[in-house]
Amino acid sequence: MSPRDPRPDADGLGRRRFLKTATAASLSLALAPLRSAYGQAAAGSPPEDAINVALVGLGAQGRVLMDAMLKIPGVRFVAVCDIWPYARTYGQRYLKKNGFEVRAYENHQDMLEKEKDVQAVIVASPDFWHAPITNDCLRSGHHVYCEKMMSNTIDGAKSMVRTMKETGKLLQIGHQRRSNPRYLVARNHLLKEAHLLGRITAANGQWNRAVSADLGWPNHTAMSTELLARYGYADMHQFRNWRWFKKYGGGPLSDLGAHQIDIFNWFFDTTPSTVIGSGGRDYYEGHEWLDNAMVIYEYKLPEGMARAFYQVQTTTSAGGGYFEQFMGTEGTLRMSENPKYSVINREAAAPPWDNWVSRHYLAPLKAPAKSDDDASSADDKVDARETAELAGYYLPVVLTKAIHQPHLENFFNAVRGKGTLNCPADEAFKSEMAVFKAIEAVESRTLVTCQPSDFTV
Amino acid sequence: MTETQSTPIDRGPTMAVLVLRAWLGVRAILTGVEKFADTRTLQVPLLDAAGKPDSSGAVVEVTQKFYSLHSYHAIPDSMKDKFALEPLLPTFLTTPYYAVLGWALIALGIAVLVGLWTRASLFLMGLLYVSLTVGLILIKQDAGVAWLAIHVALVAMALSLSKHNRLTLTRS
């Protein structure tokens, strides 16, 4: 058995030998139940379906993706890459515990030069490295899954789309909601097929995140100034907190907002025509990017104008959570990756949704029980102009996997030639351009107009 | 030659008692059976209009009702908690009462429905409803008290018509 291939040799496996192996495997699993989800998952996966994968970037997001990929049958880790020896060693050891002996690299070009059997590269580096790494990987003949934002610059993002088109390789961008079955059912069936909301005239989204201290690092793991400078970082603090600096990332509108602004575009099936905004560095000292922002987009839909308000706040409590809400003449849909924030309300005068309930696309929310001495009733209204109470529903669709897993599975299936990407780079670029426009509006404090040509490469 | 003239038989009271027995029997049986009901959540593939798994691969949670002896609950927990605070409802009385309540409703419902010692069964059913009323009076659930009073009135009506009772397994 190759140290890089943890799967048992299936050739000529007789029943007796199988039983012996299975017994040994059972004992092994009993002693180390978490070791190699791959070993179990890949056992049912034919060797020709296995994909050799390299992971570039072993920070927080890279580790989330790594955990999700460990649950996907047929994913075979062969290499990891990170400039920080501390993260690199962590990734190498973590994968070894899960059954993969991987080679570790500081430099992605070195990795591409030496790893000849890699088929797909997962890029989870800081944003300003996305374009150089992705373009190099695509040109080396690899398919790439790159985290969003595609880049911290418009030119960088455009270059990725161009390289994808030139090389013919797959480039999936990590807007993972596009593969989440809850979002797919809500968009494709409840909105597009059933038109449950009627004419949509407004949307709003938010991500409120509680204040948090800057990230630190164990002293003994600090990189030298020379090493940091080689990869474009000013110092260790900026390396660890790159999201707050313009040289490396796009700030909260990019980090958090990109996911949700992508949902505006995707659900509306178009790009915005204008955006106006406000925001600033209100709280944190030593950051370059704004820490709060509120923006309003205008979308010209076939049925008329719709406006979408978005706010991202990192200086408040996390009150209200994070969600994307679409409001129409007949109902309101609030979506979130966290099901507890999701709800669908039907206007009293809207046509019944019973057909969708009976088919399990919706389920009625249970009304809170009222005690006998609860005098509240229709008189609950505090204003005569208040609309009648709405019927509440929830999406009974459940995601039984890690939150990024379906999007990664979509990527790997496309690599195998089984299906198409849910978020190829040219599609993702439209959403990311909307984010760049919002940042421009906030920083210039003006109404920014968007042309259709802005969203194409 | 004498000519016998038959008096028309009034079958109304008989039909009335039969209807009352049917209603009271079904009501008690199903109330008892429901005490063995529970729900479980299943995850099943979401099906499209053609009955095929949705292209998104979505899985939905569907709530399914089922019955089992293990699921037995005499009364809702919220109500049980309220009764536990009542000094006139000591545990040594309520515990055996909860244990037999569901079975008693089913047994008495069957007895009334099929006419098994009908009068005695109706009387015991009436007492059972009175006993339930006691708890509701103590926790001041007046709507429930009135609801049970309707049941008691129907039992009393059935008893008052018992001499017209027919279609029974036993004579009494």
Image (tube, grey):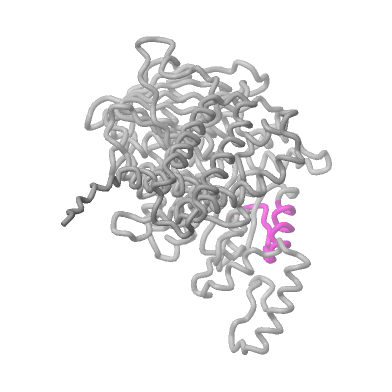
Name which residue lies at 49% across and 74% down.
Answer: A48
Residue B114 in sight: yes
Relative vertical location of residue A47 with respect to residue A130 in this rendering, above or below: below
Name which residue lies at 35% across and 38% down.
Answer: A267
Q: Among all residues in the image, which is located at the extreme front?
A: B1
Seen from the viewer's position, the closer of residues B32 and A366 is: B32
Residue A259 in sight: no
Task: Assign the N terminus of chain B to one quadrant of the image.
Answer: bottom left
**Coordinates of residue A227 in the picture (x, y in percent):** 71, 43
**Coordinates of residue A131 in the picture (x, y in percent):** 50, 44
Name which residue lies at 68% across and 34% down.
Answer: B81
Magenta-highlighted residues: A88-108
Name which residue lies at 42% across and 20% down.
Answer: A441
Q: Among all residues in the image, which is located at the extreme top?
A: A383
**Coordinates of residue A274 in the picture (x, y in percent):** 33, 23
Seen from the viewer's position, the closer of residues A174 and A321 is: A321
Task: Give the side of residue A256 with respect to residue A67, left or right.
Answer: left
Give residue B47's quadrant in the image: bottom left
